[in-house]
Image (cartoon, grey):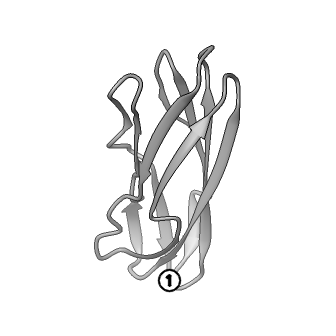
Amino acid sequence: HIAAVSKCMLIESKFPTLVSLGDEFEVDWTIRNLTTQYEEIHMKAGDPEDRFIMTGILKKTIVLLPGETFSLNETLVPVKTGPSKLPCPSFIALNETLVLVDDCDSSVFVFP
């Protein structure tokens, strides 16, 4: 799932679409620098609201060389059943002062 594309970054996410209540699952994020210069990215985890318990990297600064890729993951535990929107992190590229992802439509269905 491509979460965002800008002239400097490609951000992709990978996650299951069906999960079970109380069973942890991972959301994997991959960030690729598409430029010919280094990019400094500030990442901040999204708000899990009252649907998930979240662990993993909550804040991070990433420096990517030209063409370099960085991966990180969040572990979520669903605490309510039904369709649930995933918490969406923000990625801010300092060289562009651009929020690359600040809202996404990614969701999972949580079975009892």
Percent of width and height locating residue 4: 47, 31
In the image, is 81 to the left or to the right of 31? left
Mark 1 Cα shell of 10 Å, populated few (<14), some (14-19), many (≥20): few
Residue matched to label 1 = 112
Total residue callouts: 1
Percent of width and height locating residue 82: 40, 70
Percent of width and height locating residue 74: 56, 64
Q: Is residue 17 above or below residue 64?
A: below
Q: Is residue 68 above or below residue 60?
A: above
Q: Is residue 98 above or below residue 42?
A: above
Query: Which residue is found at the position 52% from the left and 65% from the top?
Result: 57
Question: Observer-nearest residue: 104 or 8?
Answer: 8
The residue type indicated by label 1 comes to Pro
Question: Observer-nearest residue: 24 or 59?
Answer: 59
Question: Observer-nearest residue: 5 or 69?
Answer: 69
Residue 1 visible within the image: no
In the image, is 43 to the left or to the right of 75? left
Quadrant for the N terminus in the image: top right
Query: Which residue is found at the position 38% from the left and 44% from the top?
Result: 105
